[in-house]
Every structure is written in C-alpha cells, then in structure tokens.
Amino acid sequence: MIFVISIRSCKMFCLILASALIAIAYGHSGRTHPLQQELFDNRIINGKDANIEDHPYQLSFEINGKLNCGAVLVRPDVAITAAHCTEGRSPTQITIRAGTSIRESGGQVAKVVEICEHPKYNPSNYWDYDFSVLKLEKSFELGITVNTIQLVSQEEEVETGTLGTVSGWGLTSSGGLPLRLQSVELPKVDDQKCADVYKPWNISLRMICYGFDEGGKGFCNGDSGGPIVVNGRVSGLVSWAPGCGQSIYPTVYCRLSNPEIVAHLNHCLEKFNL
C-alpha cells in the first residue's frame, strides 16, 4: 500500500507537493494517519535482477507467507526493519524469509517472537524514528546465501555522491511484484539539499536521503525496511519517498548512524538478552 499525506494547513504549492508524499510499504493492513488517503503508483524504475549471494543480509518480511516489507539480518536471530512495517502488528503475524533470490519461495523461514519498535516512532511526523528490531524464534544457518551485515558506525557521515545499493522485491514498473530480487545503486544526497527540497516538511536527524536529481531510479511498494548498503555496511532502511523514482525528490531512509537509533538497537539487544 502507498499512502499519501494531506497537510493540515498549507498553501497551494504545499498541497501539490503533499499529494506526492508516500510511505513505501506494500501489503500493509491499511492503518493510515487520519490525514492520509490511498494512492496506487506501482513503479520500480530501472532496477536489475540480483542474486541473494550478493545480498545475503537481505530478508523478506512476510505476512501469511506474502511479501509485506524488506528487512536486514544483523544477528543470526535478529533483524531490523522499518517501524511502519511493524506498526500495529503482532509477532505471530510475521515470518522472516532468508537465503533466496525468489520472492516468497525457498530459503530459510523463521517466526518473529518479539517486536522492539522505537518508542518515538511517529507516522504523523513523516515517519520519524522509522525503526524496529525483530527477535526471531531461531537463528538462521549462515552461509553463502544467508549472512549478517554490519551497520555504519554511530555518527558516521556518508560523503555526498557516494553510491549505495538498495535491494528488494517491491513492485515493478509493470505493476506487479518481481519474481527475482532487484537492486539499484543510488547516490547519497547532501543533507542540507534534501532538507531544502522537502521544505516545509521535516527531514529529521533520523533521516538520510539517496537518489538522482533526474529521478528515474528508485524503489517503491514492498521495499520498506530494506537496506541501502554503502561500502559493505548498511547506511539506512527504506522509509518513504515522493512517488517512486521521482525527479528532484530523493528517497528518505532511516539513518542508522543516528545516536538515538543506535541506542534503540542496543536497548533491544539487551532486552532480547543478547
């Protein structure tokens, strides 16, 4: 599902831009902010087929065996994803699939036994603190197709223009879910430039932006919670964007180097007794 925000009080320009702002979640239960309405804009542009061996940390977040979001393996039995994927969900509804390039098929599957959602997650404020940690019922067997990945260090800055790789099974330009894992490279956008583009809406310190000025590449429904990887470490998790691969407006990711995000991850690991 893609959600559109209507802004409480805005001039005509604001209303036009607001109509494009979306959260990139697929198959969500339909829970939306009171000021949101549904819009379908099912496009992933210029991605390419990928092999799970090249992205062994990539997970499929599934509801009743169907793709709902992406996720990332950070410990053999711990995954991270976007909070808007877990919002209102019970752990019993969620399974995590690892080790397969093919959507909803093969690999290893584990149930989720605990959700540790960031307590400051706020969908009304442009999905700020869009971060959840998941405890799995069992550890995945690590190997060529399944492996953990490190996150960027706390307060580490990614240089503007650095390419990051996003992967997932989100909707394609044909309007359907791809059978095979997709990936695309996107450059890091200058923080101030991203903030300026989205004014008067808030790009918080928990957000980081990647994308081309001309658009044409990006991810959409079903990719929320999936990783953008820079130099072998995860820089962010797919959160929201103005359409899919739109020009000018880059995709917004949860910034994993933010101290409050790092602290929450550590809190969850302690809570899980890890």
Image (spheres, rainbow, N blue to C red):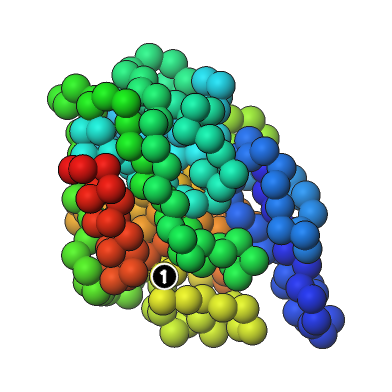
Residue extending farthest right? 12
Q: Quadrant of the N terminus?
A: top right
At 78% from the left and 63% from the top, the residue drawn is: 35
At 19% from the left and 22% from the top, the residue drawn is: 141
At 77% from the left and 60% from the top, the residue drawn is: 34
Q: Position of residue 88 (x, y in %)?
A: 59, 44
Residue extending farthest left? 143
Could you say which is closer to the camera, residue 249 or residue 74? Answer: 74
Horizontal arrangement in the rendering, residue 32 relative to residue 143 (left or right): right
Name the amino acid type tagged 1: Arg
Q: Position of residue 208 (x, y in %)?
A: 41, 69
| Residue hosting label 1 | 206
Q: Position of residue 259 (x, y in %)?
A: 29, 71
At 53% from the left and 35% from the top, the residue drawn is: 90
Position of 173 relative to 142 (above/below)? below
Q: Quadrant of residue 44?
A: top right
